[in-house]
Each structure stands twice: as structure tokens, then as C-alpha cells.
Amino acid sequence: MRLFNLTRWPTPSVFLLAGGTAATFAFVTVNLFSQAMASLAFLRRFGWTAIQHGALWQVGELILWGSLALACWLVFKICERVLEDRYFDWAHRRDRDG
């Protein structure tokens, strides 16, 4: 599981992973919001007919997009924590030495 041990990754790689997951989170969240609003409008307008024509499939897609957004957020927060720990270690070393 060395791949998932971010404390062994170089700092620029952790920073790039954090940026990539933040950008993906932003894209997925906007997509999730627009898709949810469209699905609600579709259900309100057509009711049972909407369910027969795939509204439940769309709910499954919303759950999938929501799970992806959550995963991106968690990876971002893990990267943030690793970078904070590295910064504080550096700052304490610098205070101790100088």
C-alpha cells in the first residue's frame, strides 16, 4: 500500500494531487447540482411517466456523482493534512535551529 502512503510522496506530487482532486471536485459538484435540478424538474413535470422513462437511473447516476465528489474531497483533505504536517515540521525545525 505504498502508493496510498502520501507521507512518502514528494511534496510537489502531493500538491498536484490536491489541486487535481480540488478541480475534479469542483467540476463534479457543478455537474451534480445541474443534473439534480434537471432531474427534479423532470420528475415534477412528468411524475410517474418520468420514473418509467429512466428517472430512477438518473437517481443512480446522482448517487455515483455524489460518491465521486465525496472521494475527491476526502483525498484533497488528506493531501492538505500531509502538506500542513510537512510545513509545521519544517517551521519547528527552523525555529529550533535558528
Image: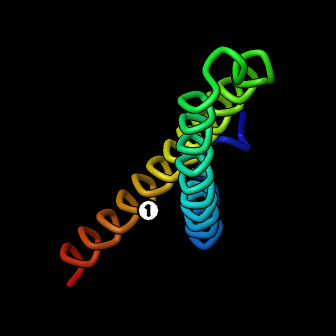
Foreground residue among 98 and 32: 32
What residue type is disc 1 on?
Leu
Tell me what residue is drawn at x 50 percent, y 42 percent: 74
Foreground residue among 42 and 34: 42
Foreground residue among 36 and 32: 36
- The quadrant of the picture occupied by the N terminus is top right
Seen as rendered, the residue at the extreme right is 53
Foreground residue among 52 and 31: 52
| Label 1 SS | helix
Residue 96 image offset from top left, x and y in percent: 20, 73
Within 10 Å of the Cα at label 1, are there few (<14), some (14-19), or many (20+) other Cα atoms? some
Looking at the image, is 31 positioned above or below residue 67?
below
Looking at the image, is 28 positioned above or below residue 42?
below
- The quadrant of the picture occupied by the C terminus is bottom left
Residue 90 image offset from top left, x and y in percent: 34, 71
Looking at the image, is 59 positioned above or below residue 18?
above
Q: Is residue 80 left or right of residue 21?
A: left
Task: Give the image quarter of residue 57.
Answer: top right
Residue 8 image offset from top left, x and y in percent: 61, 53
Task: Give the image quarter of residue 67.
Answer: top right
Tell me what residue is drawn at x 68 percent, y 31 percent: 64
Tell me what residue is drawn at x 62 percent, y 45 percent: 35
Looking at the image, is 38 positioned above or below residue 50?
below
Q: Is residue 56 left or right of residue 18?
A: right
Q: How is the image coloured?
A: rainbow
Residue 87 image offset from top left, x and y in percent: 35, 68
**Count of picture labels:** 1
Tell me what residue is drawn at x 77 percent, y 15 percent: 52
Residue hosting label 1: 83
